Amino acid sequence: MPLRQTLLCLWALIGTIGFALAQDAPSASFNLIARGRYLAMAADCAACHTAPHGGQPFAGGYAIESPLGAIFSTNITPSKANGIGDYSEQDFARAVREGIAKDGTHLYPAMPFTAYAKISDEDTEALYAYFMHEVKAVDTAPQKTALPFPFNIRASMAAWNVLFLDKGEFKPDASKSSEWNRGAYLAEALGHCGTCHTPRNDLMAEIGTKSLAGGSVGSWYAPNITSDKIAGIGGWSDDELVQYLSTGHVAGKAQAAGPMAEAVENSLQYLLGDDLKALVVYLKDTKPIASDEASPRYTLGTPSPAEAGLRGLPGQSIQENGFHVFSGACAACHQVGGEGTKHYPSLFHSTTTGGDNPDNLIATILFGLTRTVKGMPAFGPNAAFTDRLSDKDIADVSNYVLQHFGNASVTVTPADVVRVRDGGEKPILAAVAPFIVPVIVVVVIILLLVLALFVARRRRGTVTA
């Protein structure tokens, strides 16, 4: 039996046991709870609401890095003290689909309620049944989000929602097949693909006209997944896309890392085969959005004998720092020619090294890849079991890899490494944040001066009269 089917069976068995033991479960349908369990998996709830390194399922505390600061996920277990235990189904639906908690607090769009708004009433009911009747209540309170002023004023999200939240449920397209519509529902609602893969405007809302054309996700870059044959996934076969979604790896194409690796780890690898195929049918039919790239990212690069040749030269004659870092830290796993192994991907014919954006290459070196499917150690400041490379070392080895195995026209600087390490490019909204308070103070002072001048003139006028 394939691993994914085995895991699904185990998931169902665990759910059955949990259902039988739950004291309040008899009031809810077993089928409804089972469906809700699958929907929660498809929506990737665990990825953000479970803290890493042994966190309790759905108890929150995961730090979602945003350009405005870390946003900590909330406890969504049925704990009445710190979770959603006292939520009615209507409260739950409002939080999921409108981004408003039971107490009226607005949620930040790090929680993809702009996509979840399209979830149907029936699926919302099933999700509620699952979280209330099968998820174990955890009474711990996760760390609270504390963004700098004025972003800590959550009420401002009300205006943001008016501008950017479409509350309409998903509407099937009658001109398309049921399989296409299922894929669209998974991509646009439950799977919220656009949350990462769509670029955002200055107010950090998705740009609808560039849906799925690629966007920055903190330190990582979610590439174009439209049907364009060069910039997107139009050149992939259906089988390759299904394999990538279920394993995170396709030889000669790509290796998932960062948020995409988490999506594979917690969600996509457990989806039923028919749902994965439906998702592929939809993505292959999306509007193609081109870029300036002349060829697909995964076609660039070849094996290189450079490392083996340089290694044979006297040390003093080799001035390239990138070679030294590659030879000492990378070649053992990725091989001297860059062809990779069973456990480590090739460095050529890879979307990471062949694209025109080097952020994922830099981020992979900095943060590594930690997951059960395949992993790679980190070499950044927080590396635990490897040498901690400097910003210059990471820039140099990135350039060595790009020059010999990938897109040689791309150059990485130490400043690029700092940018990626610090959470990626800051949007205008974040860039102007330090000046907001001084501007407000100046405006208030000016208003007070104008008011004082007005009062003084009124008094002089009264005395003269």
Image: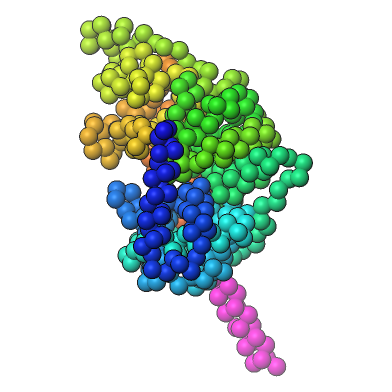
In this picture, is 86 found above or below 8? below
Q: Is residue 345 magenta?
A: no
Dividing the picture into quadrants, the one containing residue 448 is: bottom right
Q: Position of residue 444 (x, y in %)?
A: 54, 71
Dividing the picture into quadrants, the one containing residue 401 is: top left
Q: How many marks?
A: 0
Q: Nearer the viewer, residue 121 or 193?
A: 121
Q: Position of residue 261 (x, y in %)?
A: 43, 38
Q: Position of residue 135 (x, y in %)?
A: 40, 60
Q: Quadrant of the N terminus?
A: top left
Q: Is residue 461 magenta?
A: yes
Q: Is residue 293 visible?
A: no
- Residue located 62% across and 27% down the image: 234
Q: Nearer the viewer, residue 362 or 122?
A: 122
Q: Is residue 19 visible?
A: yes
Q: Position of residue 29 (x, y in %)?
A: 51, 62
For the stretch drawn in magenta, the main secondary structure is helix
- Residue located 65% across and 86% down the image: 458
- Residue located 60% across and 59% down the image: 122
Q: Quadrant of the C terminus?
A: bottom right
Stretch of the chain drawn in magenta:
438-465
- Residue located 56% across and 43% down the image: 193
In this picture, is 401 found above or below 47? above
Q: Nearer the viewer, residue 237 or 337?
A: 237
Applied colour scheme: rainbow
Of all residues, the one furthest to the right in this rendering is 175
